[in-house]
Image (spheres, rainbow, N blue to C red):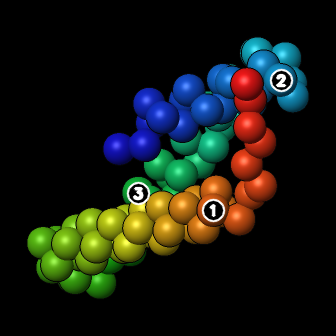
Amino acid sequence: MLVVPMNALLQYRGHRLLQPGQSIAIQGFNENASVLVMLGALALAMRADWPLVPLLSALGVTMALGLALLWGLTRRWRADRPTTATT
């Protein structure tokens, strides 16, 4: 869901902070690590016989709340930043 925006952000920031190859390697590592963690969590939930639909619904709600929190924090951060007029 966030792969394309995160990819663009990481490439932009990676170019400024690291060499491009390093930023892509770090991004790939983090994506693969998060996939492994989520697969492990799903395996544990399936082993515990948790129903799949409520489990995935909870994941969707958690992601939506997390995105709403990030959106609100970003708006607050931008409102607190001093604006600079460019003429």
The local secondary structure at tag 3 comes to helix
Marked residue nearer the N-terminal end (1 or 3): 3
Image quarter where the C terminus lies is top right
Image quadrant in which you'd find residue 41 = bottom left
Residue at screen point 63% across, 62% down: 79
Q: Residues within 10 Å of mark 3 (few under 14, many from 20)?
A: few
Given the image, on which type of amino acid does mark 1 rest? Ala
Q: Where is 65 relative to 75, above or below?
A: below
Q: Residue reaching furthest front?
A: 87
Q: Where is 53 relative to 74, above or below?
A: below
**Which residue is tagged 1?**
79
Image quarter where the N terminus lies is top left
Does residue 40 appear anywhere in the picture? no
Residue at screen point 56% across, 26% down: 8
Callout in the foreground (2, 3): 2
Marked residue nearer the N-terminal end (2 or 3): 2
Q: Nearer the viewer, residue 66 or 49?
A: 66
